[in-house]
Image: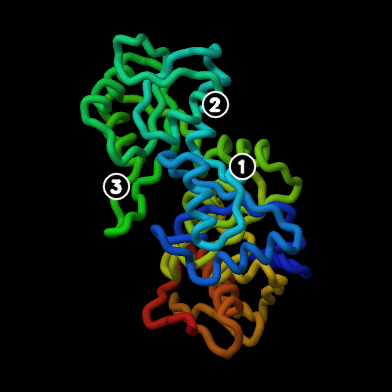
Amino acid sequence: MSLLGACETPLREAYDVAVLDLDGVVYRGRDAVAGAPEALNAAQSAGMHLAFVTNNASRPPATVGEHLRSLGVEARDEDVVNSAQAAARLLAAQLEPGSKVFLIGGEGLELALRERDLVPVSTVGEEPVAVVQGYGPDLPWKQVMAGATLVHDGLPWVVSNTDMTIPTASGVAPGNGALVRLIADFADREPEVAGKPQRALFEETLDRVGGERPLVVGDRLDTDIEGGVAIGWDTLLVLTGVTGLEELVAADPSCRPTYVAPDLATLAEPQPEVTHEGDAAAVGGWTARVVDGALQVQGDGATADWWRAVAEAAWTHLDAEGQPVATDGVRPPE
C-alpha cells in the first residue's frame, strides 16, 4: 500500500477548496512564486474555491488581498484568513463582548479583536483581562515587557502562532515564536496557540469561506502539513519554499503530505499511485530504492514523479529502520 495518496482526477476537481499557505507557496517576499498566479487562477476557473491562509498576524486581510492582486492572483479580501482572526476567535469564546485585551502585535491583530467586539489596549492601567500576541515589526520593547508581566501574573494568553522564523526581503529573521518563547520562559507557562498547526485557524478558514472537501496546500511540514494531518484533511506539499529533499525524507507520519509536487501546477493534474516493486518505489518512469541506507534513484520522466518515488521509498525505509535515508549526491531533475 502506498504511503502517498493517489487521485484519478485533477486535484482542482477532486477538492472544492484549497487552503493555501502564502509565504513560499504563492509568493516569496513581495514577488510571486513562478507560475503560481496562473495555476491559482486556472484552479478558480475550474471551480475550486481558494482560501489564502497565513500564520502571519501583522497584515490585515485587505492588505494581503491587495498584495495578491498586484501579483496577478484573482483574490478577494474575504478569502484571506490569518492567525490574528483565529486568535480573536479563541479569545471571544472566553471573554465577554467589550472585554479589554492587552495587545502585543500589529494592525492585523488590532482589527481582528475589534471584529470580535473585543477592545485592544496597550497599557496595564487600562485593566486588560487577557493578553494576545502576534508578529509586529514595530513593537516597542516597553509593550512587550508590560505584556510579559501580565502573562506572568496569570492572565489568559493567546498567541497567533509559534513560527520561529519569518521570511523577509533581506533573508530569514526571528518570527513570533522567538518572542513567544522569551515570554513563556519568563512567565514559566505556555500560551494557547491559534495558528497552524493548531485547529483554530483551519476551523476559522472553513467558517469564513465554506467548503466540504478541503485540501491544505503548504511548503512547511511542521505547520501546514502537520496541521492538515491533525485535523484530518488531505494535504499537498509544494517544494517552492522551505522544505527540500533532506526535510522530506525525514518526515514522520504526523507531518507527511497526502501529495507532494514541485509547485502549484500540480493542481491541474491527477496524482498517480506509486507502486512497490520488491524493495523499490516506482512511478512515471522513476524507480527509487534504499541500498545500505542510501537513497538511489534511476529512470527518467516528470519531475513530480521523481519526488513521489523518492518520498515513498524514503518513508518506507524510515518506518522500517527508524533512520532517515542518506541523500548524499542525490539531486532532483531540473
Which label belongs to residue 331? none
- Residue 148 position within the rendered picture, expressed as x and y whole percent measured from the top left: 29, 23
Quarter holding the N terminus? Answer: bottom right
Type of the residue with mark 1: Glu
Residue 292 % position (x, y): 45, 79
Q: Is residue 242 visible?
A: no
Q: Of residues 315 and 331, which is closer to you in this image?
A: 331
Name which quarter of the figure residue 23 lies in. bottom left
Q: Kindly identify which residue carries mark 2.
A: 115
Q: Which residue is label 3 attached to?
A: 174
Secondary structure category for the residue under label 1: helix
Residue 129 shows up from this direction: yes
Please state if 135 lies on the left or on the right of 17 as rendered: left
Please give the residue where the numbered disc 1 appears in the rendered image.
78
The quarter of the picture where residue 274 lies is bottom right
Disc 3 marks which amino acid? Pro
The image shows residue 117 at horizontal and vertical percentages of 54, 19
